[in-house]
Structure formats: C-alpha cells, structure tokens
Image (tube, rainbow, N blue to C red):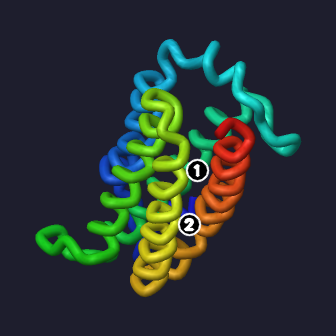
Amino acid sequence: MELLKVYGELDWKKLTRNVLIPVVGGSIIGFLANRNTQKQYAKLKKPSFSPPGATFPLAWTALYTIMGVANYRVEMKQPSQWKDTAISLYDVQLGLNFLWSFLFFKWNLRGTALIEMTILLGAIAMTAYEFNQTDRIAGGLMVPYIGWVMFALVLNYSTWILNK
C-alpha cells in the first residue's frame, strides 16, 4: 500500500484512471489487432524461445498495471495544471506500444514493427529516465517493462527473420 502513497496521500481516482487507461486500452487494442489473425500467426515459424500465447495477455496486464502506477506516482508529484516531459513521453510510448500490435499482427508488417519497437524501446527508456528524475520508485517500476520489450524486440526480430 505504501507504493501507492505519494507524500503520504493516496488518490484512488487518479490511481484508477492511470491504471485503467493502459490496461483497458491495451485489452481493446489487443482484441482489435489480433481479431481474425490467430490462424495466420499459428502458421508462422517462431523461435524456440517463443513463449506460449497465453503468456502475453498475462504479462501485458501486469506491465500495463505497473506502468499505470508509475505514471500515477509521477502525476501525483506534478502540479495539476502542469504537464511535464515525463508525462508527455509516457503518452508517446503508450501510443507506440498500442501501434505495434497493428503493425505486427493486423497488417503483417513485421519489419516495420521491428523498427517501430526499436523506437518504442527508446521512448520507454527516456520515459523511465524522466520518471526517475521525478520519482525514483516510478523510474524503477518501468524497468520490468524495458526488460519485456527488449525480449519482445528479439522475438520480433527472430520471427521476422524466420518468415522472410
């Protein structure tokens, strides 16, 4: 519970909004981007280290929740009328995160998805750095997300190479 308190205060409304935006947004994007693509994806050659499909929604739900908590902590430390670099970078990386699913699954642009994910990883790293400047805990909460996207980048690259 202490993780959710900033300056000894817990704002349930802000916390809920900050967690639900990525979790619900990611679920909707996942549904839209993956709709009618499962048969095609099943036919792709995948690297030996590719996790089972059920891993992804679980991992992403956890990561989106952690990201939302990190964003909440930074937002709580910013004056409400001031939107700083950290929050803007967070919004950009979240948009890039959502775009990737369409590139990779819906539009079958796996090479483009790889380039986009490289940009996404840079945006996440910059967001984590900026979050860390405002709140060290928020910066630290972004580390698992960086690790997962690095893994996903290798997975994207390997899948693209195997299916050229």
Q: Is residue 149 above or below residue 45?
A: below
Viewer-closest of 89 and 119: 119
Viewer-closest of 115 and 129: 115
In 3D space, how far apart are the residues under numbered discs 1 and 2 (Cα atoms)?
A: 9 Å
Name the side, left or right, on which 111 lies relative to 15.
Answer: right
Q: Residue 63's mark? A: 1
Which residue was labeled with disc 2? 142
Name the side, left or right, on which 148 lies relative to 20.
Answer: right
Which residue is pictured at 59% across the width and 73% down the height?
140
| Dot 1: element | helix
Quarter of the image where one finds residue 72: bottom left
Q: Amino acid at mark 2?
A: Met
The mark nearer the N terminus, 1 or 2, is 1
Q: Position of residue 147 (x, y in %)?
A: 67, 63
Quarter of the image where one finds residue 38: top right
Viewer-closest of 159 and 130: 159
Q: Position of residue 47 (x, y in %)?
A: 81, 42
| Dot 2: element | loop
Q: Amino acid at mark 1?
A: Leu
Q: Position of residue 22 (x, y in %)?
A: 42, 44
Name the side, left or right, on which 130 lies relative to 121.
Answer: left
Q: Quadrant of the N terminus?
A: bottom right
